[in-house]
Amino acid sequence: MLRSCAARPRTLSALRAARGGAPRPARDPGPARRSFSTEKVIHKDHSLPNPSWSKDLRLLFDQFMKKCEDGSWKHLPSSECKVPQRIHSFKTYFLDSKPVKEDQLSQARPFTRSYEVGQGFEYAMFYNEDEKRTVCLFQGGPYLEGPPGFLHGGALATMIDTTLGVCTISCMGLFMTANLNINFKSPIPLCSVVVISSQLDKVEGRKVFVSCNVRSVDEKTLHSDATGLFIKLDPEKSLT
Amino acid sequence: MLRSCAARPRTLSALRAARGGAPRPARDPGPARRSFSTEKVIHKDHSLPNPSWSKDLRLLFDQFMKKCEDGSWKHLPSSECKVPQRIHSFKTYFLDSKPVKEDQLSQARPFTRSYEVGQGFEYAMFYNEDEKRTVCLFQGGPYLEGPPGFLHGGALATMIDTTLGVCTISCMGLFMTANLNINFKSPIPLCSVVVISSQLDKVEGRKVFVSCNVRSVDEKTLHSDATGLFIKLDPEKSLT
């Protein structure tokens, strides 16, 4: 089952985020820890501070961890255990799609955790269940360059998609991005930290409407705002 | 000057695409070739076939190279030479942005060419000047996984942004993405090839409106469609 191991992956994007810490050599995830009492393998959480994190990112992370103390906010770990059936389970929703070769699948890595520490996507997510809000603290590394000295718009779109996906966590079932509408207002300097604040706006049948804004740490600069539409997957219905 | 070396980088996204071949150890770009007559350094073109390309991608590439023979289509090389002033030049458009540290900038890599060969974004672009169209042949590698066995929506958004940016090449000046509106209709199997076909729809003052669709190689599956708004940069005017 797709969401049998990761923390609260009720949406595909949540699954993506939760899957972020897949064990792989490049990122040196450290050894998996086996709990002999339950025979469950516990992997390292990649959404915890590492040496590449800037002072800004560490401070923000500490602030949100403090908010978690009264239970209003929850830190969403970025870890995964391999679920052998996960690909098969997901493919039942897209039976007509071309099969991916086994040797290619064995090399697969979750996009947002596919770089070595500090080079690409460094982020941590927090969720407020009462307010249906998710916050992503994001530091885009030097390998995500778009315009000279600035973050690539596609790298920001990737984190917006991921954050909005996690935001749909409050709805049951398996969801997938159907639409992203992103306004880019001010470019993000490479290696700086931004805060992506998202919220669930509306649920209409299979549709979940979410939105977010992307601000600088001092909140003075609005870098971007976006809306997302997520559709609950149904093998008998299309996404559109 | 931002576009002094790369091929036709009249837009930032075109610049991104053109900058794709930045020399860096991980991708093994091969030695730069110096032309002594002009003192211009010519770097390897990373939009040419390599061993990671599938049969589908090679066949499509050959078809488009054939279309180039009569001059109607042009292959857009993905190569770059370092321009010392490029960052300074670009920053004049965003004087209020936080400066990026020199040691971080020295590690910067263009996002779409930041992976080793075959792991991430493998693509080639072709441009038809008369029809104001750009086609991107794209193979998303195993490190770009989103939903299990499928391409991450953010990776597709990245290539859509890049292709639409290149499509604005027909307009003079320095452009930047202001809006992307993407419909995700059918997920793309990891490691498969898709064709992103874009066209310039309208120019209104500083605004350029472009659109694209993303189809499977056999054209039977519409994976996505999108629109983009690009704004000509002006140091005295905001993007919105």
Image (cartoon, coloured by chain):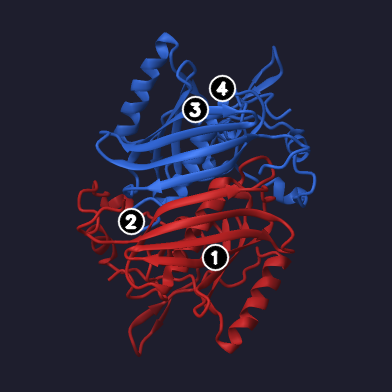
Chain colours: A red, B blue
Q: Quadrant of residue A24?
A: bottom left
Tell me: A92 left or right of B13: left
Residue drawn 39% across the image and 36% down it: B213
Disc 4: which residue: B170
Looking at the image, residue B217 sits to the left or right of residue B31; the answer is left
Q: Evaluate if marks 4 and 3 touch, with contact meaning CB atoms under 8 Å apart.
A: yes
In the rendered structure, find residue A106 and report the number of the disc placed on it.
Answer: 2
Residue that carries the numbered disc 3 in the rendered image = B200
Label whose residue precedes the other's in the sequence (2 or 1)? 2
The residue depicted at 52 percent of the width and 61 percent of the height is A211
Compute the Cα span from label 4 to label 1: 36 Å
Nearest-to-viewer mark from 3 and 2: 3
Q: CA distance from mark 4 to mark 3?
A: 8 Å
Q: Is residue A122 above or below residue B26?
A: below
Whether marks 4 and 3 lie on the same chain = yes
| Label 2 packing within 10 angstroms: few (<14), some (14-19), many (20+) | few
Neighbour class for label 1 at 10 Å: few (<14), some, many (≥20)? Answer: many
Q: Alpha-carbon neighbours of circle 3 within 10 Å: few (<14), some, or many (≥20)? A: many
Quadrant housing the C terminus of chain B: top right
What residue is pinned by disc 1?
A: A198
The answer to whether mark 3 and mark 2 are in CB contact below 8 A is: no
> Between marks 2 and 4, how big is the CA–CA gap?
42 Å
Residue type, numbered disc 2 = Ser
Left or right, residue A146 beside residue A240: right
